[in-house]
Image (spheres, rainbow, N blue to C red):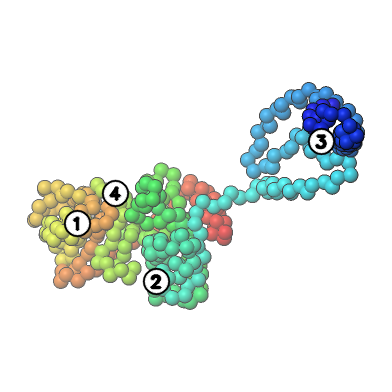
Amino acid sequence: MVHLAIDRPPSSDRPGHSGLLLGVVALVAVAAAFGGGFWAGRATAPAAPIAAAPPAAPAPAAPAPVAEGAPPAAPAAEVEASAPPAGAAAAPTAPLPPAPAAGAPAPSPFHRAVVTLSGPLEESVARALAPADRAMAEELTAVVNRLLVWDLHVRTDGRKGDRLEILWSPPEPAAPGVPIAREPTVEAIRYASSKLGAVLAAYRFQPQGARWARHYRADGTEVESRLVDGPIVDYEQVTSLLRDGRRHKGVDFKTPVGSPVVAPFDGVVERRNWNFAGNGNCLDVRDPASGRHAIFLHLDVLPKEMAVGRRVKKGEVIASSGNSGHSFAPHLHYQMEDSGGRVLDPYAVHRTERRALASPDRAAFDAARARLDAALKG
């Protein structure tokens, strides 16, 4: 009970009629205040006396691990405790995310582009790429052209409406925000040519024990032709041809510095290290029988014994590939000329062959091709 201490007014010191009246008024006010507080308290008080607080419930056990992607299940005790009181509307609950379908394929780690040819290939590729990828349009087009050029020259043989599908991955960055100056990797392509009435396809695959991955057709044969008795045995890829429209005078073989370079025929060293700023370390070997020249540019350090006038045998190692002179990446430039200095196409002079996958690699290749086809379809 609240006790109110009320100081008497000065007029109450002397008894009289007015003092008695003021006293009665004060007593009525106090009674009214006390009675109002009592009934207000009754109106707001709970119907039943407050019981002692129950003992604290034990902490819930840690949830069991849930498989990645599965929705977490609420413990039964929590569901019961969260039930609304009788007569109250139940709060709407958010639907659980759908569980992934059993056996659903994982998303492809590669970039995919579907190109409809309309104008130059590079412009068509750029329009098909996501905005963040368009800076790679030129390099991506160069790699695609390199794969198609063995069967089709898009610049002259492409038709408006031809469909090209590309599965590719960008080059790895050397450091955060600093890209390596190299080309993207094309995992697979399909080109539906209206001129040829056929679909050209290429799939990247690395056979067991092979040093590099190469691109193969659906039948397991290499996309690239190889030069029989060519200047280099082991290389990763042909990156330039005379017929690829780049006005290049030779064939470029992408290969690490130090790869053995061999003489394609019996000959004589005609020149050594001329125009060094452009050619770097270089050799010119002449065939006395035909007068043709085989020219090798951007070599590593030349052996001293490869002096002018030195005779070499077909298949003899005469130098190592390098990255000297005006070169942007390690490779071998192989150029052929006739006796009058006219540039020849090595693929027209040498015999050529297309190698096929060995039988033990076919099952793995077919499985890889099926996965790439599925990714190409999106």
**Residue under pointer 1:** 325
Kind of residue indicated by mark 2: His
Circles 4 and 1, Cβ within 8 Å, touching? The answer is: no
**Residue under pointer 3:** 80
Tag 3, which secondary structure? helix
Q: Quadrant of residue 250?
A: bottom left
How far separated are the C-alphas under marks 4 and 1? 16 Å
Near mark 3 (Cα within 10 A), the count class, few <14, some 14-19 or many ≥20, is few
Kind of residue indicated by mark 1: Gly
Q: Nearer the viewer, mark 2 or mark 3?
A: 3
Rendered residue at 52%/55% (across/down): 372
Q: Which of these two is toward me, 3 or 208?
A: 3
**Residue under pointer 2:** 153
Which badge, 4 or 1, comes first in the chain's sequence? 4
Kind of residue indicated by mark 3: Glu
Residue 192 versus residue 262 in the image, above or below: below
Q: Nearer the viewer, mark 2 or mark 1?
A: 1
Q: Quadrant of residue 333?
A: bottom left
Q: Quadrant of residue 345?
A: bottom left
Kind of residue indicated by mark 4: Pro
Q: Which of these two is toward me, 152 or 73?
A: 73
How far separated are the C-alphas under marks 2 and 3? 71 Å
Tag 2, which secondary structure? loop
Q: Quadrant of the C terminus?
A: bottom right
Circles 2 and 1, Cβ within 8 Å, touching? The answer is: no
Which badge, 3 or 1, comes first in the chain's sequence? 3
Rendered residue at 47%/75% (across/down): 118
Which badge, 4 or 3, comes first in the chain's sequence? 3
Q: Is residue 190 left or right of residue 43?
A: left
Residue 82 versus residue 132 in the image, above or below: above
* x, y percent for residue 306: 12, 51
